[in-house]
């Protein structure tokens, strides 16, 4: 733009000067008449020289101004680029530092959780064994413990769940992936677990021969956390309208395999949707709020992604995408 304006100005001055010089010559000769023609030409030469000198001076000034402005702009641009690069480097450094700090905190948290979990599991199993012994001793005596004993057992199970969630979330151990056929693995995982008897879990496993590099224990935890949430949502739903069913489906394309877990429970309210992956966020009375953050962590450790969609009153769909083993090798 600047170059265009400068060029235009110079061009106008040159054309204007040439026109003025020629026009001046004609005017002087016309005015002088045939007798004083030589004198008029001499005047014209002096005036033309003067005019051309002025024009050259103006062109020079414009060119110098143009060069100075262009230089200034170039140095401004350079300065802006250096500032942007510096800001970017600063941001990357801050990010790396934050990552390191997070890693360090996670490692401390992991160690602490492992120690606490170990210390708590021992007394818990002592309580469990004692209950078993008390039950055995009471067998045949007609003594029934009823609800208090059930409460103790429920509380132990709850403590177990809390410890498990904490260990899974803060453990963050390195993955030990191995290539497995996704459908066969998922079918076996579902077969091994027991789910509430009144909830139907249907399967549509359509990933064919898709092979995924997965850490059996970690990914199993992720899938079970999602199914556990679905079961709890169904249990919390209106018993008259909630369909007691969960659908587990898989599919695969050339690059990735997908596990889709859908329930037809009460769904997730839009206002809490942005928080469901926040650690410790829970809408449940006894929830740890570590289930979904753990699922996200595990899926991302596998190089995959998780997406949750929900319609209040209709249900929730959790989509887990995992890269295929072959696609991974191709990308490497
Ligand atoms: N299938 C689901 N249906 C309805 N709400 C869900 C579902 N899955 C997750 N949520 C919501 O997300 C929150 C966080 O889930 P999660 O991290 O597993 O923690 P927790 O289960 O301990 O509450 C839950 O408290 C619940 O509000
Ligand atoms: Mg949960």
Image (tube, rainbow, N blue to C red):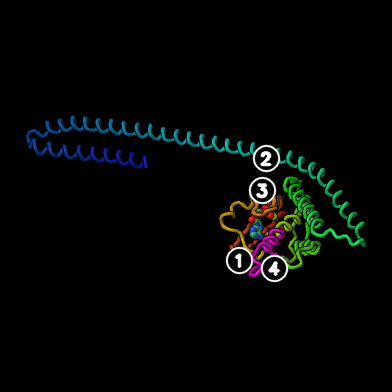
Image disc number at residue 314: 1
User: Circle 4 is placed at which residue position?
Assistant: 245
Helix, strand or loop at mark 1 = loop
User: Circle 2 is placed at which residue position?
Assistant: 102
**Relative image position of residue 15 (x, y in whole percent):** 25, 41
Foreground residue among 257 and 141: 141
Mark 2 and mark 4: Cα distance apart in space: 39 Å
Q: Is residue 97 above or below residue 144?
A: above
- Quarter of the render that holds ligand 2: bottom right
Left/right placement of residue 268 relative to residue 49 reads right
Mark 2 and mark 1: Cα distance apart in space: 38 Å
User: Circle 3 is placed at which residue position?
Assistant: 280
User: Is the CB atom of the residue marked by disc 2 within 8 angstroms of ligand 1's nearest atom?
Assistant: no
Please report whichever mark, 4 or 1, sits nearer to the chain's N-terminal start: 4
Number of other residues with Cα within 10 Å of mark 2, as a class: few under 14, some 14 to 19, many 20 or more: few
Foreground residue among 332 and 125: 125
Q: Magenta segment range?
A: 227-252
Foreground residue among 123 and 142: 142
Q: Badges 3 and 2: C-beta atoms under 8 Å apart?
A: no
Number of other residues with Cα within 10 Å of mark 4, as a class: few under 14, some 14 to 19, many 20 or more: some
Helix, strand or loop at mark 4 = strand
Residue 178 showing in the rendered view = no
| Tag nearer the camera, 2 or 1 | 1
Residue at screen point 77% across, 40% down? 111
Image disc number at residue 38: none
Mark 4 and mark 3: Cα distance apart in space: 27 Å
The image quarter containing residue 305 is bottom right
Please report whichever mark, 1 or 3, sits nearer to the chain's N-terminal start: 3
**Relative image position of residue 166 (x, y in whole percent):** 74, 47
Q: Is residue 234 magenta?
A: yes
Left/right placement of residue 98 relative to residue 4 reads right
The image quarter containing residue 264 is bottom right
């Amino acid at each position: 733009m600047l170059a265009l304006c400068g060029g235009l100005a110079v061009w106008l001055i040159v054309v204007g000067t040439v026109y003025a010089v020629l026009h001046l010559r004609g005017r002087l000769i016309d005015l002088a008449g045939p007798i004083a023609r030589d004198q008029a030409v001499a005047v014209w030469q002096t005036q033309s020289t003067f005019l051309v000198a002025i024009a050259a001076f103006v062109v020079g000034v414009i060119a110098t101004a143009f060069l100075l402005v262009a230089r200034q702009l170039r140095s401004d641009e350079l300065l802006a680029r250096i500032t942007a690069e510096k800001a970017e480097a600063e941001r990357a450094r801050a990010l790396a530092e934050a990552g390191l700090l997070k890693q360090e905190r996670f490692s401390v948290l992991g160690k602490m959780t492992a120690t606490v979990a170990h210390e708590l599991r021992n007394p818990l199993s002592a309580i469990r064994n004692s209950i078993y012994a008390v039950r055995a001793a009471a067998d045949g005596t007609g003594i029934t413990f009823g609800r208090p004993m059930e409460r103790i057992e429920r509380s132990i199970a709850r403590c177990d769940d809390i410890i498990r969630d904490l260990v899974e979330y803060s453990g963050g151990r390195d993955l030990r992936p191995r290539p497995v056929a996704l459908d066969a693995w998922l079918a076996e995982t579902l077969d091994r677990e027991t789910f509430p008897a009144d909830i139907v879990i249907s399967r549509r496993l359509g990933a064919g021969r898709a092979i995924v590099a997965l850490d059996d224990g970690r990914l199993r935890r992720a899938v079970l956390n999602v199914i556990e949430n679905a079961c709890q949502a169904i249990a919390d739903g209106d018993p008259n309208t909630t369909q007691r069913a969960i659908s587990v489906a898989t599919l695969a394309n050339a690059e990735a395999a997908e596990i889709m877990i859908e329930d037809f429970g009460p769904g997730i309210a839009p206002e809490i949707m942005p928080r469901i992956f926040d650690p410790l966020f829970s809408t449940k009375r006894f929830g740890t709020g570590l289930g979904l953050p753990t699922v996200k962590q595990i899926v991302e450790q596998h190089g995959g992604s998780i997406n949750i969609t929900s319609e209040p009153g209709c249900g929730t769909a959790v989509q887990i995408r995992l890269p295929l083993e072959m696609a991974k090798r191709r990308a490497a």
